[in-house]
Image: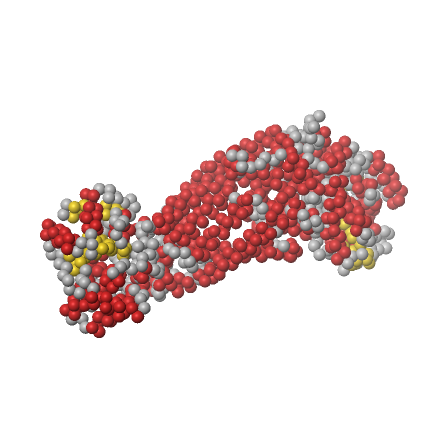
């Protein structure tokens, strides 16, 4: 068994630094605007949470290894080396207080994609053994057991039996040649199984052939969260193998935001080749089905509802319009948050923060930003499309004693499907 | 030869009336920025002043300074003063030559030991004294010898004041100004190429009136004449402020009399009285004639870049520097790029695959 | 006796040459350093394009998101005032344009000098405000390194000396003009090796940001 060392960590930094990173560090003028986009700073007022500050170890390696002045400084001992102690100190900054929500990347005046660099910096943190314990455990479970929460196939099968009993529909597993292979997140299996029921209803309604895969049902990718491409690759490979074994046309990412970015955007780059299948987010698919008239809904939610954009879906995933089209399809009083879409605020639990127990207190504080915007919206209920966001916000509401039900958008759509052939009116629209 | 006649007597002999004399005194006062109350004092002083003996030495020069002074129009203040001084030695103007001329100089020095004014035009070669000699005497020796008994020295023209053209890069004769050789006598620098005639007579009038030299600037020039820049006194200054410039010597802007900055006018860095005293009996001055100031009253003006290049343009070849720099930068950049790729490639080769077994630090 | 003039000739000649050489070599070198690190080919199926969104981000980052602006208006206002004032002073002052014309072979019309003067005053005030803000704002204090102060000084000195030279507040003029040029030369020398490089690299950074996000269908 090998071990993590600072040398490996610095080597990883050196590997990760590319032209964009060099351009970003060259451009930073220390203006501090990124702090205003970071909920960990805005809610604590502690300047150490300034996003660009979180990248100091990576910046230092860049300067020392890839710039003439840095090399000269290093030669004369004018620059401090990145040490294991420094990285330990930065663990809180790169993990506990960063969800990689990329809001800072949207506001940086010189255009620095800070989240892109945090993702890269975590590679060095992992290689040097400086990832937080909770995140390490999640990765270990994901690789060894198949899910970061330790959900095994047998647990899934048990849930499926319940759902099948409830809905009277079949949940197909390992059906070769199905059009779509749906992925799930552990949280959906354990905490929100209604999502799976929702899928079954929608696909039955739209007449779509789909399947789950016994060897690749888990969509979440702890490797992305901890920041290890090697681990992430191993996990993505399972999905690729499963999809290719079942010869599906497309893989459906569940609502879970980071799962989507993992399989959709990082996946092909991790395995080093283009996929032979398409990857589509469930909301994108539902929106396509809505547009083509393959799903029809009836009735509108009367309550005032708002929508929380999971960061990984909007800023990092590009799924921006679909949830709005779907919200308008099933609600009559949909209000946007003051800052929404690509400008939405993070729930505070992404990027591995929710699986990092040490960060729980900070996460709770940071959630206040979202809570206040949700309250200001005047909505009676909150809809979102990410099991992790949902769980984090439910916990947050509990802590702040806010009474606001949280719904999953897919289930909401499933609930409004026209049940009997021909009986429903075309969905009303506002 | 110097005689003991006073200035008042001399002027009357030349038919100058009392009224004319007072007018001259007022003009002198105003020229030197003295209050009108000083006019009687000036008149009294000048009335009593003795005709001073002046020895004029010409070294590495072009005679332009002498031309400038002698061509000034009569009857001006300068001509009045100039007619009055006893110019005992000036090898361009004097009739005597050879040994007789030198004898005149020595006689003047002897008779007025410690009281004569020494006027110098031209710079002094130090690389080889043989570059410029008069009657077999090198410039530097003649200057030292003549300066020893002088009351004060007036370095006329930029050559004598700052080295001028002979000192221009690469200064083949090792030319230096008077001030670098003579350090123990008061020196007034009346720079300009040539200097304005009224300036030298003004200095003379001051010397005669007060028995001392006028207040000087850091370059040893009379503040009264060199206190303000051409730019600040230029009648075209409003066009500079409005951003209206002549682009060529025959364009619309040039015809309309716009600012000549872009045509290389060195007015902003040049301190002189041209804009107010003017030339040719007050008829005009270079900028009024449509040509930018060359900066001729400033040290090293010959080396201050092309006369037709704006002051803000460096004297070096900027385009060449940029091109050379870019080529050198590309060469060095290619080397740096190779180094960076090497570091990055090495790091990728050294990459040890991270598995979940490698997540903890070694103890 | 003629030191100020010697000094002016030195900074207008050799000094400028040396500074400009270091500047050009440095900038080119830095660009090589950056681009040599490359960028992996993205194998994910694109949702959008890279080039256009990258170019758009270059433009859109000039304007802050309104909500972020409200959270930290001072940084934005100071930043705008200082940058605009600096650009006016640098690019629209006729003597400067003459220098660019000499270097690149083409020029452009300048502004009346009182306008440039006003811009310079605004720039100087904004720079002083920026200094105060950097020293007092906790976030900025935390992320400020020695280099940030140096860069501030290198930017401030040419503005200050330029202002003094234009108003002829220091005698003799060649001295202050020389100091102005010297401060510009200091700026040129420091430029490639400090974050002053952002003048050029921000376009690269913004493009990468816009392109990488554009690929995923997000206009950043």
Question: Camera-side residue: C170 or A236?
Answer: C170
Q: Position of residue B40 (x, y in %)?
A: 26, 70
Q: Position of residue B21 (x, y in %)?
A: 21, 70
Q: At x 23% / y 45%, what residue is drawn?
A: B125
Q: Is residue A317 visible?
A: no
Display colour scheme: secondary structure
Question: Camera-side residue: B30 or B333?
Answer: B30
Total marks drawn? 0
Q: Is residue C157 visible?
A: yes
Q: Is residue B75 left or right of residue C118?
A: left
Q: Position of residue A93 (x, y in %)?
A: 67, 42
Q: Is residue C149 left or right of residue B84?
A: right
Occupied quadrant, residue A252? top right
Q: At x 68% / y 39%, what residue is drawn?
A: A91
Q: Is residue B330 left or right of residue C144?
A: left
Residue C211 higher or lower than A125, as above or below: below
Q: Is residue A398 left or right of residue C45?
A: right
**Which residue is at the far right?**
A165
Q: At x 71% / y 42%, what residue is drawn?
A: A96
Occupied quadrant, residue B41? bottom left
**Which residue is at the far bottom?**
B19
Residue A119 higher or lower than B217, as above or below: above
Q: Position of residue A202 (x, y in %)?
A: 81, 47
Residue B268 higher or lower than C198, as above or below: below
Question: Camera-side residue: B166 or C2?
Answer: C2
**Which residue is at the far top?**
A1
Question: Camera-side residue: B261 or B303?
Answer: B303
Q: At x 80% / y 53%, what residue is drawn?
A: A402
């Amino acid at each position: 068994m090998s071990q993590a060392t600072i040398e490996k960590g610095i080597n990883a930094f050196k590997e990760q630094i590319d032209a964009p990173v060099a351009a970003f560090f060259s451009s930073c003028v220390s203006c501090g605007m990124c702090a205003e986009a970071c909920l960990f700073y805005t809610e604590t007022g502690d300047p150490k949470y300034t996003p660009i500050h979180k990248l100091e170890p990576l910046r230092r390696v860049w300067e020392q290894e890839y710039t003439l002045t840095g090399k000269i400084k290093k030669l004369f001992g004018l620059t401090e080396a990145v040490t294991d102690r420094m990285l330990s100190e930065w663990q809180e900054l790169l993990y506990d207080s960063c969800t990689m929500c990329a809001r800072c990347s949207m506001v940086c005046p010189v255009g620095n994609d800070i989240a892109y660099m945090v993702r890269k910096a975590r590679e060095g943190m992992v290689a040097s053994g400086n990832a937080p314990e909770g995140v390490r455990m999640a990765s270990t479970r994901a690789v060894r057991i198949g899910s970061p929460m330790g959900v095994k196939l047998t647990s899934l099968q048990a849930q499926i039996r319940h759902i099948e009993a409830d809905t009277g529909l079949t949940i197909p597993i390992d059906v070769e040649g199905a059009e779509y292979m749906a992925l799930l997140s552990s949280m959906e299996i354990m905490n929100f199984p209604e999502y799976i029921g929702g899928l079954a209803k929608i696909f039955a309604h739209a007449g779509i052939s789909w399947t789950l895969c016994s060897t690749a049902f888990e969509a979440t990718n702890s490797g992305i969260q901890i920041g290890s491409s090697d681990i992430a690759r191993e996990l993505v490979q399972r999905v690729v193998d499963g999809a290719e074994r079942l010869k599906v046309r497309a893989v459906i990412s569940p609502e879970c935001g980071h799962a989507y970015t993992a399989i959709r955007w990082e996946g092909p780059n991790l395995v080093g080749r283009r996929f032979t299948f398409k990857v589509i987010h469930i909301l994108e698919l539902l929106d396509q089905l809505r547009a083509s008239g393959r799903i029809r809904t009836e009735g509108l939610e009367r309550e005032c509802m708002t929508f929380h954009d999971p960061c990984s879906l909007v800023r990092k995933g590009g799924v921006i319009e679909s949830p709005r089209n779907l919200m308008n399809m099933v609600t009559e009083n949909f209000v946007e948050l003051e800052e929404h879409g690509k400008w939405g605020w993070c729930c505070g639990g992404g990027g591995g923060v929710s699986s990092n127990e040490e960060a729980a207190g900070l996460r709770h504080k940071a959630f206040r930003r979202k809570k206040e915007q949700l309250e200001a919206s005047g909505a009676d209920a909150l809809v979102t499309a990410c099991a992790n966001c949902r769980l984090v916000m439910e916990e947050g509401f509990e802590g702040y004693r806010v009474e606001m039900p949280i719904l999953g958008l897919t289930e909401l759509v499933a609930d409004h499907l026209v049940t009997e052939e021909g009986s429903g009116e075309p969905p009303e629209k506002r | 030869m110097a005689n003991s006649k006073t200035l008042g007597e001399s002027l009357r002999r030349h038919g100058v009336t009392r009224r004319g004399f007072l007018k001259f005194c007022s003009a002198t006062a105003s020229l030197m920025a003295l209050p009108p109350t000083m006019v009687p004092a000036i008149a009294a002083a000048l009335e009593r002043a003795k005709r001073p003996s002046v020895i004029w030495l010409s070294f590495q020069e072009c005679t332009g300074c002498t031309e400038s002074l002698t061509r000034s129009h009569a009857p001006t203040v300068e001509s009045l003063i100039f007619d009055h001084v006893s110019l005992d030695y000036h090898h361009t103007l004097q009739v005597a030559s050879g040994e007789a001329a030198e004898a005149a100089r020595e006689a003047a020095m002897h008779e007025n030991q410690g009281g004569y004014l020494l006027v110098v035009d031209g710079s002094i070669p130090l690389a080889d004294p043989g570059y410029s000699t008069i009657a077999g005497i090198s410039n530097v020796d003649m200057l030292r010898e003549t300066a020893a008994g002088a009351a004060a020295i007036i370095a006329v023209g930029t050559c004598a004041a700052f080295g001028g053209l002979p000192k221009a890069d690469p200064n083949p004769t090792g030319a230096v100004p008077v001030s670098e050789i003579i350090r123990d006598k008061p020196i007034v620098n009346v720079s300009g190429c040539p200097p304005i005639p009224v300036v030298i007579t003004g200095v003379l009038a001051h010397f005669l009136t007060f028995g001392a030299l006028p207040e000087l600037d850091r370059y040893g020039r009379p503040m009264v004449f060199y206190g303000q820049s051409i730019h600040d006194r230029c009648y075209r200054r409003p066009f500079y402020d409005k951003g209206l410039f002549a682009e060529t010597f025959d364009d619309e802007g040039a015809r309309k009399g716009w600012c000549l900055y872009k045509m290389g006018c060195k007015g902003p860095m040049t301190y002189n009285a041209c804009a107010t005293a003017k030339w040719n009996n007050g008829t005009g001055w270079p900028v009024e004639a449509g040509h930018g100031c060359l900066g001729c009253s400033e040290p090293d003006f010959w080396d201050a870049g092309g006369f037709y290049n704006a002051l803000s343009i460096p004297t070096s070849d900027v385009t060449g520097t940029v091109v050379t720099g870019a080529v050198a930068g590309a060469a060095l950049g290619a080397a740096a790029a190779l180094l960076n790729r090497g570091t990055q490639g090495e790091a990728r080769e050294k990459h040890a695959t991270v598995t979940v077994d490698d997540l903890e630090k070694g103890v | 006796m003629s030191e100020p003039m010697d000094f002016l000739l030195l900074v207008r000649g050799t000094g400028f040459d040396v500074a400009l050489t270091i500047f050009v070599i440095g900038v080119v070198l830095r660009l090589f350093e950056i681009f040599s690190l490359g960028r992996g080919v993205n194998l994910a199926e694109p949702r959008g394009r890279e080039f256009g969104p990258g170019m758009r981000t270059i433009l859109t980052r000039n304007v802050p998101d309104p909500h972020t602006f409200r959270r930290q208006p001072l940084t934005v206002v100071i930043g705008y005032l200082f940058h605009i004032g600096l650009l006016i002073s640098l690019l629209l002052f006729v003597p400067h344009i003459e220098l660019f014309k000499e270097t690149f072979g083409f020029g452009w019309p300048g502004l009346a000098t009182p306008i440039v003067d006003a811009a310079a005053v605004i720039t100087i005030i904004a720079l002083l405000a920026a200094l105060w803000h950097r020293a007092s704002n906790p976030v900025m204090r935390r992320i400020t390194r020695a280099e940030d102060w140096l860069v501030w000084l290198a930017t401030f000195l040419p503005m200050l000396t330029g202002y003094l030279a234009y108003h002829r507040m220091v005698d003799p003029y060649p001295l202050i003009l020389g100091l102005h040029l010297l401060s510009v030369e200091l700026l040129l020398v420091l430029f490639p090796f400090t974050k002053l490089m952002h003048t050029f690299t921000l376009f690269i950074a913004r493009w990468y940001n816009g392109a990488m996000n554009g690929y995923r269908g997000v206009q950043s």
